[in-house]
Image (cartoon, rainbow, N blue to C red):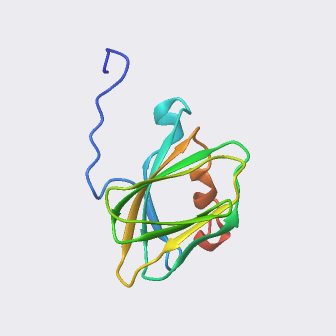
Amino acid sequence: MNDDTTPLTILKATDGDAFDFGGLGVHWKIDGPQTAGRFSVVHHPIAPRALAAPLHYHHNEDEYSYVLTGTLGALLGEQTVVAGPGTWVFKPRHQWHTFWNAGDTPCEIIEVIAPSGFEQYFRRSPQRGAT
């Protein structure tokens, strides 16, 4: 819903900052300040057979990953899942998880992070040269 205080925003495929961490790409699409902190959205291209993130959990954020192309593997607690295009994978806060490209072709996911904030982790990475 749009009102006079919220501008209509259209994002093109190439809009937003992007960085390749060597197997995991991060393309920032919607940052937290744009949603009053409710959520953020990043696009993750993942190289074939690449580990996207080591085993970890979040104290405050839920992650919702939508598979655009390829095959996403994920460990959610003690359950391993494999998801193809059109599938959502929910990674709730306080649950140990990891995810990877489970195929021999590139995988791309859209990740919704709620509430926002964790998208800044990638921006601050020393690998990216950020402080």
Q: Is residue 10 above or below residue 124?
A: above
| Res 38 → quadrant | top right
Tell me: 85 left or right of 113.
Answer: left
Q: Position of residue 20 (x, y in %)?
A: 47, 73
In the rendered image, the vertical position of residue 23 relative to residue 32, given as above or below? below
Q: Is residue 83 above or below residue 23?
A: above
Q: Residue at x 62, y 49 (%)?
A: 118
| Residue 66 coordinates in the image, percent (x, y) | 40, 54
> What residue do we see at 46% from left, 35% from top?
34
Q: Position of residue 23 (x, y in %)?
A: 49, 78
Q: Nearer the viewer, residue 58 or 6?
A: 58
Along the viewing direction, whichever of 103 and 115 lies nearer the viewer: 103
Residue 130: horizontal and vertical position, in percent? 63, 63
Q: Quick one: quadrant of the C terminus?
A: bottom right
State which quarter of the image contains the N terminus: top left
Q: For the image shown, how many numbered marks are present on the structure?
A: 0
Q: Is residue 74 left or right of residue 9?
A: right
Question: Residue at (32%, 15%) from the top-left corner?
Answer: 3
